[in-house]
Image (cartoon, rainbow, N blue to C red):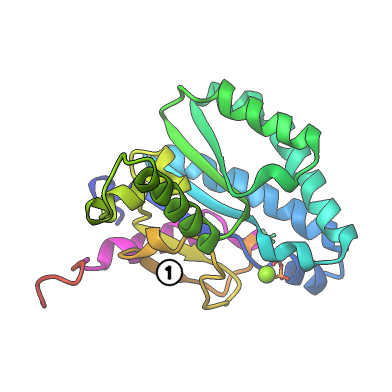
Amino acid sequence: GLRRELMPRHVAVIMDGNRRWARMKGLPVGLGYEAGVRSLRRIVELCGKWGISVLTVFAFSSDNWFRPKVETDLLMGLFESGLRNELQHLNSAYVRISIIGDSSKLLKPLRVLLADAMETTKNNSRLHLIIAVNYSGQSDVVQACQNLALKVKDGLIEPEDINEFLVERELETNCTDFPYPDLLIRTSGELRISNFLLWQLAYTELHFTNSLWPDFGEDEFLEALCSFQKRQRRYGGRNL
Ligand SMILES: CC(C)CCOP(=O)(O)OP(=O)(O)O
Ligand SMILES: [Mg+2]
């Protein structure tokens, strides 16, 4: 059975397979995305129940803009309405919300809502929900390098001072006590990272499942946690 003391502190999720789920049921794409939002709500609850500290979800990648505009509008609209409907509940459940990614491309009402959600929930400490919107793992590393280059240029640090800790501090996930996910879950059978977190996944246990995201429920989540607890994490060290 699951042991609470062996729980991952930080879980990252690539919520994939919403459109295939809709197509398999002969439903419009929008209902697949809506089912995906319900799935996310369920996993947030389960993280709170199992004492997981950080949940980072890939909600929209910078590549997703290449989808038909009607779909990206649908996704953005659902994201905004979902967050607007849930904010009060999340806040009262002591869930802190952070957004990572380039939000400058998002419409103003959504940008204002995101800033408000981050401000309202910034002191909540039960679960830290990090939502990656228009996020690119490579851009995250690039902006960290730019910040460090600026510090060298301003004479604040020397090039030889730059190490993993200085880089980590500049990454967008530095907004949490546990910036490195212990477990990454990707649904729908895809076996790719898709430019999600890159630097942060250096020692993360990877769990892939064929379940489509809308079908990823409590049983599937517990199965992923069980798989995680059975692994001997070596961090490249002792060769058991
Ligand atoms: C934007 C993202 C969270 C949606 C994930 O599902 P998806 O649209 O990639 O669905 P498919 O992989 O089935 O096309
Ligand atoms: Mg997909």
Residue at 65% of width from left, 25% of height from top?
116
Q: Nearer the viewer, residue 100 or 30?
A: 100
Q: Is residue 143 above or below residue 157?
A: below
Query: Disc 1 residue type?
Result: His
Magenta extent: 214-233
Asked where in the image residue 27 lies, by quadrant, the reply is bottom right
Which residue carries the number 1 mark?
A: 207
Tell me if residue 109 comes above or below residue 231 in the rendering: above
Q: Position of residue 69 (x, y in %)?
A: 88, 60
- Residue 7, position in %: x, y? 31, 50
Q: Residue at x 50, y 31 (%)?
A: 96
Residue 175 image point, x, y percent: 43, 38
Quadrant showing the N terminus: bottom left
Can residue 147 be seen in this snapshot?
A: yes
Name the quadrant containing residue 114.
Answer: top right
Identify the residue at image location x=52%, y=40%: 45
Q: For the point 45% across and 37% down, which residue is it?
A: 48
Q: Is mark 1 within 8 Å of ligand 1?
A: no
- Determine the secondary structure under disc 1: strand
Q: From the viewer's perspective, tell me whether residue 114 is left or right of residue 121.
A: right
Front residue of 116/31: it is 116
Asked whether 182 or 40 is in front, the reply is: 182
- Left or right: where does residue 83 sit relative to residue 162? right
Categorize mark 1 by other alpha carbons within 10 Å: few (<14), some (14-19), many (20+).
Answer: some
Residue 27 is left or right of residue 147, and the answer is right
